[in-house]
Image (cartoon, grey):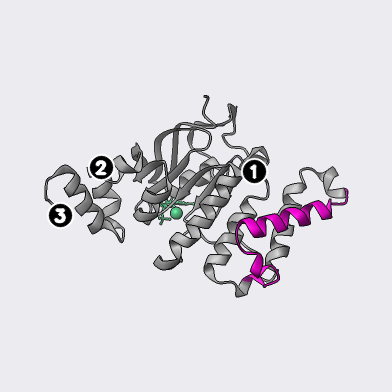
Amino acid sequence: MSPILEVTGINKTFGAVTAAKDINVSVANDEIIGIIGANGAGKTTFVNMVTGWLEPTTGSIKFDGRDITGMAPRRITRLGISRSFQVAQVFSTATVFDNLMIALGIAETTSILSALRPLRRAGLEQRADLLLKRYRIDDYRDAVASTLPQGVRKLLDIAMAMVSEPRILLLDEPTSGISVEEKFDLMDIVMSALKEEGVTVLFVEHDMEIVERYVDRVLAFYQGEIICDAPPSEALIDPKVIEFVIGDEPQGQMMREKAALHTGSGETSDA
Ligand SMILES: Nc1ncnc2c1ncn2[C@@H]1O[C@H](COP(=O)(O)OP(=O)(O)OP(=O)(O)O)[C@@H](O)[C@H]1O
Ligand SMILES: [Mg+2]
């Protein structure tokens, strides 16, 4: 089957900084991909380029066979690629329900002309209620967003990214700011909701236990390059990944021990 997303030879430089270096990735429909890498490795830059927030210096990005390189974010969203941000982007003075209605209204407005037509309010309300249930935030329907617990805020942000019914969703650190105890509950909700929606997912994650549990495939970034592209069973024991990615993360020691067991080296030191 032809890939839903095809990234070919993209590079991005900011002055002297190389944030992306010859990145080549082909994503199949329905894949769940984890993007890992230390701070500054180029993960957000990659997400920004695929979603149109940054234009690659060179290279091309194809979505469903169509060249989307350099297209504006709104146009890319309309075609079927949506995203969430590292910091949840919700309207803090509006209620959860109204946040969804605003996002649905924006998604509905695809041209100047359609903006003049009355929105199909009943249809949008139904969709908002379905999203509230699917992302398990219906108890917070009438709560003002600024008062939400961090986990609910994250779920709302992801539900809002799904209003346009994208075929690809990119999440930039969906579990950042969430306590270790709450992370798995949050990801269980997110992943089962996204599975119901049948969307291809790429998410940036620092927690290797989350990566191990939820993804089919790992893209490991280091200094703007992809240093490993493999299933988690291989990627999380890859020596380069351990040295340049996992070593800096909270579970680095545990993962190094696992890798040592796997290779039988018995080497678990930080050396
Ligand atoms: N708009 C920008 N202008 C200049 N430099 C930038 C810009 N965006 C990113 N960079 C640089 O590009 C590199 C990659 O940054 P990026 O934000 O993609 O990293 P990241 O992997 O998402 O890191 P983190 O885990 O901290 O979110 C860094 O050196 C960063 O400082
Ligand atoms: Mg980032």
Is residue 169 rendered to the left or right of residue 207? right
At horizontal 72% and vertical 58% (from top left) the residue drawn is 129
Expressed as whole percent of the image width and height from the top left, the position of residue 143 reads: 67, 72
Is residue 131 rendered to the left or right of residue 238? right
Residue sitting farthest toward the left: 266
Q: Which residue is mark 2?
A: 238
Cβ of mark 3 under 8 A from ligand 1: no
122 or 23: nearer the viewer: 122
Residue 3 visible somewhere in the drawing: yes
Expressed as whole percent of the image width and height from the top left, the position of residue 267 reads: 12, 51
Expressed as whole percent of the image width and height from the top left, the position of residue 118 reads: 88, 51
Q: Secondary structure at mark 3?
A: loop
Identify the mark nearer the N-term, 3 or 2.
Answer: 2
Is residue 258 rendered to the left or right of residue 20? left
Residue 224 visible somewhere in the drawing: no
Q: Which residues are magenta?
A: 117-145
Q: Secondary structure at mark 2?
A: loop
At horizontal 76% and vertical 55% (from top left) the residue drawn is 126
Corner quadrant of residue 78: top right
> Which residue type does callout 1 highlight?
Thr
Q: Which residue is mark 1?
A: 77
Badge 2 crowding class, 10 Å Cα cut-off, few under 14, some 14 to 19, many 20 or more, is some
Q: Quadrant of the C terminus?
A: bottom left
Q: Secondary structure at mark 1?
A: helix
Report, in whole angstroms, how far the alpha carbon at label 1 lies from the one at label 2: 35 Å
Report, in whole angstroms, how far the alpha carbon at label 3 lies from the one at label 2: 14 Å
Q: Which residue is mark 3?
A: 268
> Which residue type does callout 3 highlight?
Thr
Badge 3 crowding class, 10 Å Cα cut-off, few under 14, some 14 to 19, many 20 or more, is some
